[in-house]
Amino acid sequence: MFTKDDLLQIENHGLSREAVEKQVENFRKGFPFLKIIRSARVGDGIIAVDEAAADALRADYREAQGKLKIEKFVPASGAATRMFKDLFSYVESGEMNPVVEKLAANMDKFAFAESLAEKVAPEATLKEKVEAIVGAGLEYGSKPKGLLLFHNYVTGPRTPFEEHLAEGAMYASSNGEVNIHFTVSPEHVEGFSTLFESVRERYENRYEVKYNISMSVQKSSTDTIAVNEDCTPFREGDGSLLFRPAGHGALIENLNDIDADVIFIKTIDNVAPDHLKADTIKYKEVLAGLLVATQARVFHFVEQLEKGEADLEEVKNFVEKELCVVLPESVKALEGEAMAAALLRVLDRPLRVCGMVRNEGEPGGGPFWAEDSEGKVALQIAESSQIAPEQKALMAEATHFNPVDLVCATRNYKGEKYDFRNFTDPATGFISSKSKNGRTLLAQELPGLWNGAMSSWNTLFVEVPISTFSPVKVVTDLLRPEHQ
């Protein structure tokens, strides 16, 4: 299948022949669907937190905060091209569409309006203004979302990058320091770095913190080979193999490189201006409070199990009722050391607490109870592509969806960091049809970061209000109340 030149290219890409052959095999066999048992709901896998409990959990987090190394992890590599799809269409065809109509009627309400006015003449036509937004001028059509102006303030407009700096100071600081890691595209590292240096002093003075900002790019060693429709390797005009980025699931490698006790994960475009941040801060602390409280109990039981001093029935009840892991009957029948070893395998793994928003429209990834290959039933975040056609009705029945609002605990009770790569499900992923230079190809994506890439983590779901979820998928989303 592969020539000597192919093998050299594979090696230079940071991949092994065996890994690429496995990728090709995945194309041929496809990926199995997740075995969904039912959707998770409040009282059945999703925890609803009342005000008293919320206050207690926030206090738990704040008490632990100064003893923890905390990191905020922000996937920020995506370009804003899709955000401006309708603007590109208008520039190319000249045909008006609803998005451009709304943009034109509210141009002065956008945070980038003043910057745009500096790039075009006062008498500029609508088309000239739109061209200046996506092309020569603001160049928003080729920039990442993190560098666009999203929100207006008396002190001047802010980018999502800056909003994450502000958020980080409000809930992710420890001993006066805020650690934030952004995953970015190689071509935009300089842009993010330049922006940070220009605003660092302002935000450090305002929030009385010191920022430690780091960035990484998606590793080429996580790329996947492209194939033709017959599953033979797709080759470029010069005969070389084509490798493609494998989706956000590849970022488990970047996440794995972070040395922190607690990691908050949130996407770059899900930000709100300061006057609407209260719920975000509150529920980030609620999630983190539940994380540290649950982790403390896990550590207690793991230590007891390792010493042979555990009440096995008490541990089993904790695993099934509080950690939401339903053990298979074969495990429940075990006794003594065998049962202790089985419970230890369940407990000794990374832990995450995920916010879930009530579904008020089309859901994204949803919260489900799913069964693994060993018969264990636990909570999973599943995308529609992971669910078999005959189970699609379960997606429609889901009451909540995943807004990518996670808090993760990374260490075992001895303080040793887990290797996250040992807790992925390589049997998860999906295949899509793409094209290059007019030729059809099949592309393969790794399991999503919060789906298959974390499928073997212990997981808790907590209901969070819709006010904590304000993503920007289309430019006119910036006109919504949550961004004004």
Image: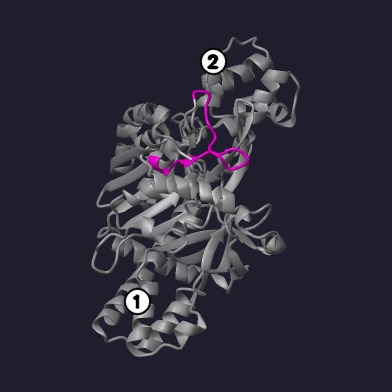
Q: Main secondary structure of the magenta part?
A: loop
| Image coordinates for residue 480, horizontal then vertical, percent | 63, 40
The answer to whether residue 397 is visible is: yes
**Residue at position x 59%, y 9% in the image:** 121
Instruction: Reply yes or no: does residue 236 show up in magenta.
Output: yes
Q: Report the disc number at residue 136.
A: 2
Q: Position of residue 358 (x, y in %)?
A: 62, 59
Give the residue drawn at x 61%, y 11%: 122
Q: Identify the secondary structure beneath mark 1.
A: helix
In the picture shown, does residue 286 fall above or below 435?
below
What is the distance, in whole Å, between disc 2 and disc 1 at their CAs?
59 Å
**Front residue of this view, candidates 326 and 397:** 326
Which region shows up in magenta? 221-238
Q: Report the residue marked by disc 1.
A: 344
- The amino acid type found where label 2 is placed reads Ala
Which of 163/278 is in front? 163
As displayed, is residue 441 above or below residue 344?
Answer: above
Q: Does residue 459 appear to the left or right of 443 in the view shown?
A: left
In the figure, 312 relative to 144: above or below? Answer: below
Q: Is residue 284 visible?
A: no
- The three-letter amino acid code for the residue at tag 1 is Leu
